[in-house]
Image: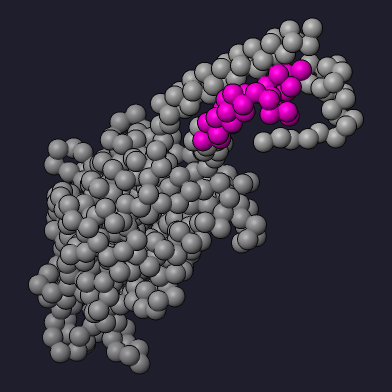
Amino acid sequence: MQVYLPEGIHYLMVTRFKSMIGRLLYGAGFFYGRIRAGYVLCGVCIIACAVLCKPIYAYAAEAVSDDAVRIVIDPGHGGENLGADHNGYLEKEMTLIVAEAMREELEKYEGIEVYMTRTSDVDMSLEERIDYASEVDADFFFCLHFNMSAEHDMYGAECWVSAFGECYARGMDFAKIEMRQLTGLGLYDRGIKTRLGSRGQNYYGVLRMGDLAGIPAVIIEHCHLDNYNDEPFYDEYDWLVKYGKLDATSVAMYYGLKSDELGADYSDLSYEPTPVPSHVVRPDDTPPDRMSVVYGEPYRTESGTWIDVEITASDTDSRMLYYSYSTDGGVHWSERYRWQDDQGQQIGDSILTDTIHTAIPVSSDRDMYVMFRVYNLYNLYTDSDVYYIQKAVPEGEIYQEGEATSHGGDTQSLSDYEGYTEIDRDEGADDALGTVLPRDLSGIMLFGLIAILVLAVLSVLGIMIYVIRDHRRMK
Ligand SMILES: [Zn+2]
């Protein structure tokens, strides 16, 4: 094959041999095709460079995007593991819809890579989920759930975080943002909590294994599927998409991301980071320390006879969450009511002694043996003494202060059954794992560099040989 140069260039580069480049190129046989070995050698070198540079470029590109946050979204349950199942609502299906919406929203932000443990209805063990997060070198693991309680009497949103070190601190930082958003929708605030198993480790599997893998994780229990209080917050498909977007926004806020598409910029958002605890952050394992109830005088309204009640409770470890009452001495109990102030506001974390006001209807059929029960954030409760109220005939002074008796929390959330016992399932999980890029390319890189170096040295040697030979011939 011959390549003809324009006369001028030929003159400058080849005939006159003025430039070193001209000599080299000429020597390599590039232009005159005289020396086919030069062609072959250089051709091989170029192809080899192109092939071997590809993984290096990929690695370089990856190294550049290493600034990107890498998160894993974990739609809870899947396959035979249905999760909460109530009135046709299936947790495993709902978490997947939320997760897809969360991913879609997050991908509109810059500087984030989003992975999902599963994208279809497959069984996956908790270990597989965390292993996947490790494989993709995740910075954070978001575990999406919906809740249910054994007695169908609980409602509200809550987050669970690790009880240990850095994972606790980062989990708390994110969960505070997430809970602010969830309660902003009108959901009741069940708090951000830790929970320990019998061996003093994190109770929940993904938190326990996340700690071992060095990946902060949070379990988001968006709301309860079995209580009328929360029903307006999940009864339409749109709600699930809304949760997905809300979860995504919390992540964007936490990492200070920005999105031109959404017109959102959280890069200036700052928050006080939770200090890394030096020891385990234990959940409250004692019921409210003290409770007392003050009853008013019975009074008539159009809706019947009522008695005002003032309930005071204190707990040195955690705040109060609900109260309920019984009118038959503790045999049957009312639904759980919100522990909130007279303005209808939930009382904050910092207040450990609270007084709330409420009123209960007085039966006109029978005498009542009234007891009140207060529940703290960890579902542990304390009962008041029994207080006698005569059937709806208001008479005399019936002012009395009840003494408190305490009980352990025996009403368990369904989340009690989520994740402590590890069940290994092998089938179907691979489908959900997706493609994992090799992270450690140093071996390939080293090989590529050596190969290119050898080829480059050979090329230079070849060129030099031909230059010298041609130089001699020109003489
Ligand atoms: Zn769940």
| Magenta segment, prevailing SS (helix, strand or loop) | helix
Q: Is residue 35 magenta?
A: yes
Q: Quadrant of the C terminus?
A: top right
Depth check, front residue: 466 or 321: 466
Percent coordinates x, y for residue 4 in the rendering:
78, 35
Look at 14% across and 55% down and name the residue there: 407
Percent coordinates x, y for residue 450 in the rendering:
49, 20
Percent coordinates x, y for residue 335 in the rendering:
24, 73
Q: Quadrant of residue 305?
A: bottom left
Percent coordinates x, y for residue 460 in the rendering:
62, 16
Specify the farthest residue to the left. 331
Q: Quadrant of the N terminus?
A: top right
Depth check, front residue: 248 or 357: 248
Specify the farthest residue to the bottom. 302
- Left of 466 or right of it: where is 279? left
Look at 87% across and 18% down and name the residue there: 16
Q: Give above or below for 52 relative to 107.
A: above
- Left of 64 or right of it: where is 245? left
Q: Give above or below for 268 relative to 322.
A: above
Q: Quadrant of residue 211?
A: top left
Inspect this view and state whether residue 58 appears: yes
Look at 21% across and 52% down and name the residue there: 125
The residues colored magenta run 23-51
Depth check, front residue: 430 or 394: 430
Depth check, front residue: 373 or 119: 119
Look at 73% across and 7% down and name the residue there: 472
Inspect this view and state whether residue 59 appears: no
Q: Give above or below for 453 relative to 248.
A: above
- Left of 395 or right of it: where is 64? right
Q: Is residue 170 magenta?
A: no
- Left of 305 or right of it: where is 14? right
